[in-house]
Image (tube, rainbow, N blue to C red):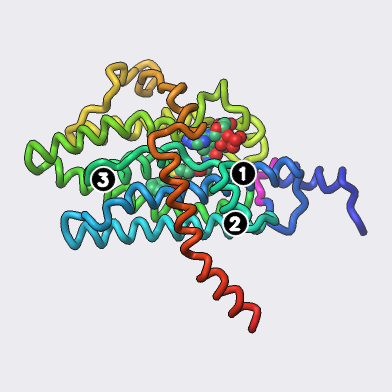
Amino acid sequence: MELSETQLSEHFEATIARQGRIEPRDWMPDGYRKTMIRQIAQHAHSEIIGMQPEGNWITRAPSLRRKAILLAKVQDEAGHGMYLYAAAETLGTDRADLTERLIDGRQKYSSIFNYPTLSYADVGVIGWLVDGAAICNQVPLCRSSYGPYARAMVRICKEESFHQRQGYELLLTMMRGSDAQKAMVQESVNRFWWPSLMMFGPPDAQSPNTERSMAWGIKRHTNDDLRQRFVDMTAPQADRLGVTLPDDKLRWNEARGHHDFGEVDWAEFKAVVGGAGPCNADRIARRQAAHDAGSWVREAAMAHAAKH
Ligand code: FAQ
C-alpha cells in the first residue's frame, strides 16, 4: 500500500521523537535532506581544506618521528573527507558536484582553515585546540539523527581524539625545551585561541539553523553550549601546559560552575566566512590546482570502471 505524504511525514517525526535513525532509503522532508547535505558537505570540505595548513609543514618536520606522525594525521583528514563525501552521496548528491560548489564558493568550509600556519608549534596547537574543538562539536554528532553521518562520526571522533593527544604531546615537549620553543608555543596559542572559539559558529541568538537542526536531531547542542564546554575543557589543559590563553576575562565562575570568557570578535568571523580571511583565496586556489592535477586519475578510474 502506498503511504500518503502525511503518513510518511508522521513516520519521520515519530522516528526523530524516539531518537531513532533516518536511513538513506527512508522518506525525509526536503528541508531535512537539504540541511544534512549542507552540514555534511561543509564538514567534508573542512577536512579536505584542513589538510593544507598542517600539510604545509610536512617537508619541514623537525624529526623523522614528527614527520611520520604529521603525515598520518593529514592522511586521516583525507580519509575523514572521503567518509563524509560518501555519507553526503547517500542523500542523492554527487562528490564531483560538491567539489565544484566548494571551489566556486557556493559551499562553505570551517573558518579556522583560513588562518596561516607560521611555525611548527602551530602543528601542536592545531592538534590541541582545533581537533579539541572538533571533538567537542562532533562527539554529540555520533548521535545525530542521520544514520550514515552518525556512523561516520564515530570513526572520525576516535581519530580526532588521537590527533588531539599528539598535538598536546608535541606542545608538552616544546614547553620542556628552550625559552625560544616556549615562546613559539605561546605565540601560536595567541593566534589560534579566538579562531578556535569561532569554529562553533555564531552566537545562538544569531544562528539561523540551530533551532531547526536541533528539532530534527541533527545538532544535539547549541553553538554557545559547545563553545562553553570547550572553554571549560581547555582552560585547565592550558594551565598544565604552562601557557596563557589570550583572554583577560577568562576565569572560573564558581556560581555558574563554568568559566567566564570574553567576547569573540564576530566581525572578524563574518569577514573570514565571507571570503576575506588571510588565506581564503590561497586555500581555494590550491584546492583547484589539486583538482585539476588529479583529473587524469579520475578519467583513468572512470574508463577502467566502464570496462568492468
Ligand atoms: N566556519 O546557523 P549556524 C574539522 C556558517 S572540524 C564557516 O550556526 P549550523 C576537523 C553556517 O554554515 C571543522 N562557516 O549553522 C579537522 C551557516 O551558513 P550556511 C568542521 C560557519 O550549520 C581538524 C551560518 O554560518 N566541522 O574539520 C562556521 O547550524 C584539524 C550560520 O551558522 C564541522 O563542520 C564556521 N566556523 O552550525 C580537520 C562540524 N560556523 O551554511 C583538519 C559539523 C557557522 O547556512 C585539521 N558542523 N558557519 O550558509 C556543525 O556542527 C555545524 O554546521 C556548525 C554550524 C556548528 C559548524
Question: Which residue is located at x 45 percent, y 58 percent?
Answer: 290
Query: Separation of disc 1 and disc 2 at Cα?
Result: 12 Å
Please tell me whether residue 146 is drawn above or below residue 133 in the rendered image. below
Residue 226 located left or right of residue 233? right
The quadrant in which residue 118 appears is: top left
Residue 140 at least partly seen: no
User: From which residue to which does the magenta span run?
Assistant: 16-21
SS assignment at label 1: helix
Question: Which residue is located at x 55 percent, y 75 percent?
Answer: 300
**Residue type at the position of mark 2:** Ala
Mark toward the start of the polypeptide (3 vs 2): 2
Say whether mark 1 is within 8 Å of ligand 1.
Answer: yes
Q: Which residue is mark 3?
A: 124
**Residue type at the position of mark 1:** Arg
Residue 238 in the image, given as x and y percentages of width and height? 24, 33
Q: Which residue is mark 1?
A: 38
Query: Separation of disc 3 and disc 1 at Cα?
Result: 30 Å
Q: Which residue is mark 2?
A: 87
Q: Nearer the viewer, residue 196 or 24?
A: 196
Query: Separation of disc 3 and disc 2 at Cα?
Result: 29 Å
Question: Which residue is located at x 37 percent, y 44 percent?
Answer: 131
Residue 6 at least partly seen: yes
Mark toward the start of the polypeptide (3 vs 1): 1
Question: Which residue is located at x 44 percent, y 35 percent?
Answer: 199
Dot 1, crowdedness within 10 Å: few (<14), some or many (≥20)?
Answer: some
Are circles 1 and 2 on residues that touch, CB within 8 Å? Answer: no
Are circles 3 and 1 on residues that touch, CB within 8 Å? Answer: no
Residue 103 in the image, given as x and y percentages of width and height? 54, 48
SS assignment at label 2: helix
